[in-house]
Amino acid sequence: MRAVAGGLLATLVAAWAALVEVLWLPLRIGGVAVPVSIPAALAVNLLLVVLTHRLTGSRVAAVLPAVAWLVVVLPASQRRPEGDLLITAGSEGLLFLLFGVLGAAIAVGRVLAAPAAAGRAPAPAPAQGSGARR
């Protein structure tokens, strides 16, 4: 139950963060682009995957934030029938996608390459000989 609740919460947080990051992409202060979405995408994807794995102990639940981020971000990079486009093909949009996917890939790779959950007892060592003393 803990893995399900943690996975659901992490998925919702990742979807919300992805939406906020997409909407921050065109942020400008005084006409100067402020690319806060790019480091935010990298940091959020790295942290959410690892924190979800630590909290739930489930590898499946740990992958869900990265998938949720992609599910929100990829449609935002495609033109809608009305002509709306949130993530453009400029350098900011491409760097946002690159660093977001890079952060997710690194975090998921680390989680999947980690040894099995630490809560499990190690397998007993095989018995040697008959156990009788000489």
Image (cartoon, rainbow, N blue to C red):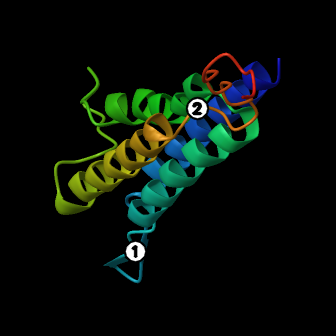
Q: Which residue is mark 1?
A: 34
Q: Which residue is mark 2?
A: 116
45 vs 32, nearest the viewer: 45
Q: Report the amino acid beneath label 1.
A: Val
Mark 1 secondary-structure assignment: loop
Going from the N terminus, do you reach mark 2 or mark 1 first? 1
Q: Residue at x 63, y 38 (%)?
A: 53
130 vs 122, nearest the viewer: 130
Mark 2 secondary-structure assignment: loop
> Residue 76: image x %, image y %?
35, 35
81 shown above or below 108: above
36 vs 117, nearest the viewer: 117
Categorize mark 1 by other alpha carbons within 10 Å: few (<14), some (14-19), many (20+): some
Q: Residue at x 57, y 53 (%)?
A: 47
> Residue 69: image x %, image y %?
47, 36
Q: Residue at x 65, y 33 (%)?
A: 117
Q: Residue at x 30, y 45 (%)?
A: 87
Q: Report the amino acid beneath label 2.
A: Ala
Locate residue 40 relative to residue 102 in the image: left or right. right
Q: Quote the CA–CA distance across marks 2 and 1.
A: 41 Å
